[in-house]
Image: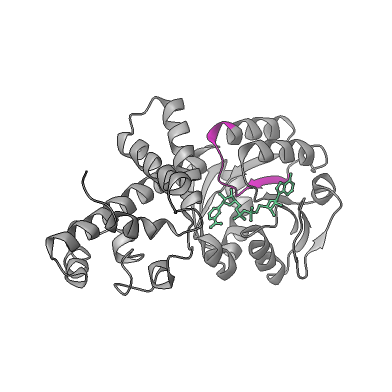
Amino acid sequence: MKIGFIGLGNMGKPMALNLLKDGHEVIGFDTFPADLDDISMAGSAADAAIGADVVIMMLPNGAILQSVADQVLKTMTTGAVLLDCSTVDLDSTRSVAKLAEAAGIIPIDAPVSGGIGGATAGTLTFMVGGSDEGFAKAKSLFDTMGQKAVHCGASGNGQAAKICNNMILGATMIVTCEAFAMADKLGLDRQTMFDVVSTSSGYSWTMNAYCPAPGIGPTSPSDNEYKPGFASELMVKDLRLSQQAAEMADADTPIGQMALKLYEQFVFDEDGNGKDFSAMLPRFEKRSRR
Ligand code: NAD
């Protein structure tokens, strides 16, 4: 396929390289292009979209997404797919989808889970919103860039799935860290705590696969001085999106709200900026109840 790829940052660049490796023709555009290896670059987003079967976007936020979509929709071919893999607010996703449909373009939102490691290895999970036709057209690209793509329903449902997942992730990480710090104070050995919880009803991805306690469970950022991984400030972004969506939908999410408050405090008032989101554990170790 001929692919326009807009936003070649930490995630976009390795995703584009995997598409190139798979034999696709990739034309990129980025406002601050770093070292882009073999990716050919256009002079603008609109130019990168000319004649493309699919235009992929991997951008920082909803405002930038809307502005880029506005530019590429002017030059895209009717019937082509506009595939947004960024994590953004639902309003932006749905308004881009409306504009695309009005222009005869098929919109797909497909935010990812798996981080930079998954983007490089081609093992991302895509959570996909949009039509059956769009999903079918993009499926082979999901297979190249990832290991799994779940069609979640109409436009916006990919973003909805992503922010629900990450609200669970943030809240679960916090309570896992709280429990380790409490277990220390109760005199319970960390390895024993892991052995019990990882095989009992308190088990979770954060405990079993990404344990925040160094030296326990499979290797994770806690074994590398909490270098991300998944940075705490990205968790703040995703939790903010979840609470924005909760406001929009009038959903009661007290734990998600509290998780956002704690990660904001950790990143903006404490020393969490630039640390993996599992660094909540050393944070709790230092604290007492009052
Ligand atoms: P990044 O900041 O490294 O990359 C974004 C790129 O977009 C940058 O290179 C930037 O120059 C470019 N850009 C900004 N404005 C532009 C414009 N108007 N036109 C063209 N290019 C423009 O961010 P990232 O880590 O690659 O993340 C991208 C998206 O993926 C975000 O929405 C993020 O939330 C999501 N995400 C990131 C991770 C992760 O671990 N980094 C994991 C899952 C999802």
Measuring from the top left, give residue 199's x and y in whole percent. 19, 66
User: Camera-side residue: 270 or 39?
Assistant: 270
Residue 184 against residue 7 in the figure, above or below: below
Q: How is the model colour-coded?
A: one colour
Residue 167 against residue 100 in the figure, above or below: below
Measuring from the top left, give residue 168's x and y in whole percent. 35, 47
User: Camera-side residue: 27 or 87?
Assistant: 87
Residue 287 included in the magenta stretch of the image: no
Residue at left offset 68%, top offset 33%: 101
User: Camera-side residue: 136 or 59?
Assistant: 59
**What stretch of residues is rendered in magenta?**
80-91
Residue at left offset 53%, top offset 65%: 118
Residue 153 is left or right of residue 40, and the answer is: left
Residue at left offset 35%, top offset 39%: 256
Residue 265 is left or right of residue 115, and the answer is: left
Residue 84 included in the magenta stretch of the image: yes
Q: How many numbered circles are shown?
A: 0
Quarter containing the N terminus: bottom right
Residue 213 is left or right of residue 273, and the answer is: left
Quarter containing the C terminus: top left
User: Hey, which quadrant is residue 185 in on the image?
Assistant: bottom left
Measuring from the top left, give residue 181's x and y in whole percent. 23, 58
Residue 155 is left or right of residue 171, and the answer is: right
